[in-house]
Image (cartoon, rainbow, N blue to C red):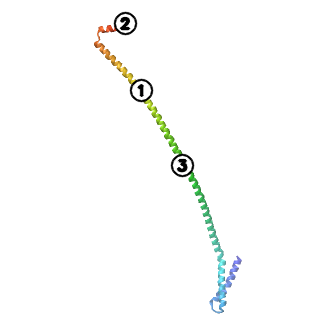
Amino acid sequence: MWRKTAFLIVLILLAVPALASEGGHEGSSVLGLSLRILNLVLFFGLLVYLAARPIRGFFEKHTEGIREELSTSLEQELKAKRLAQEAEVLQAGVDAEVEKVRRRFEEERQRLGSEMRASTQTALARLKDEHVRGAAHQEEEFRRNLAAYALDSARNESAAYLQAHLTPADRSRFLDGVAKGR
């Protein structure tokens, strides 16, 4: 700190005569020009000495900030590329799984359709057999009922006819014939 202060005092003391010479135009022009050049050199030297470190610090911080942003940007870019690759892999996996599910669905649909057709054909065959058996059973029942009805009707008609037209002599002759075994 003392060094800076001492250097600053020396520069100011050297700059004062140069400034004093600016006021009047006495003396030689070479001396005046050399003092002006010395004054200019002292001014820029002092300016560089005092402002160089803060300006350098500013630019170093700014450069470091840009490097950090660039590094962060590169890291984010790498991360984004990695995530994009992972997303592509996941998408390919999802697409493969969707295709697998679609194939299984189609196979299951075809299997169920086949089972349904087979089950329907079996049920239709069973219903047809039951219908044929039921129709045969109803036909047999109808024949029995018809035969019973025909016999009842014939018996009733015969009884009515015999009662209406059969005489007691015909009855005794009929009974005699049954008893003899004809």
1 and 2 marks in contact (CB < 8 Å): no
Name the residue: 66% across, 77% down.
50
Task: Tell me: residue 63, above or below residue 27.
Answer: above
Inspect the image, locate mark 3, and give the three-letter code of the amino acid beneath it. Glu
**In terms of image quadrants, where is residue 13?**
bottom right
Q: Are marks 3 and 1 in contact (CB under 8 Å)?
A: no
Q: Earlier in the sequence, mark 3 or mark 2?
A: 3
**Image coordinates for residue 25, horizontal then vertical, percent:** 63, 92
Amino acid found under the numbered disc labelled 1? Ala
Q: Tell me if mark 1 has few (under 14), some (14-19) or many (20+) residues whose alpha carbon lies within 10 angstroms of its own.
A: few
Q: Identity of the amino acid at label 2?
A: Lys
N-terminal of the two: label 3 or label 1? 3
Numbered mark located on residue 180 in the image = 2
Q: Residues within 10 Å of mark 2 (few under 14, many from 20)?
A: few
Single out the residue that lies furthest toward the front. 182
Residue 138 spot, x, y in % from top left: 40, 26
First along the sequence among labels 1 and 2: 1
Please name the residue shown 40% across and 24% down the image: 141
The residue wearing badge 3 is 99
Residue identified by numbered label 1: 136
> In which quadrant will I find the C terminus?
top left
What is the quadrant of residue 37 in the picture?
bottom right
Residue at 32% over, 7% down: 173
Q: Secondary structure at mark 2?
A: helix
Is residue 136 left or right of 11 when viewed as pictured? left
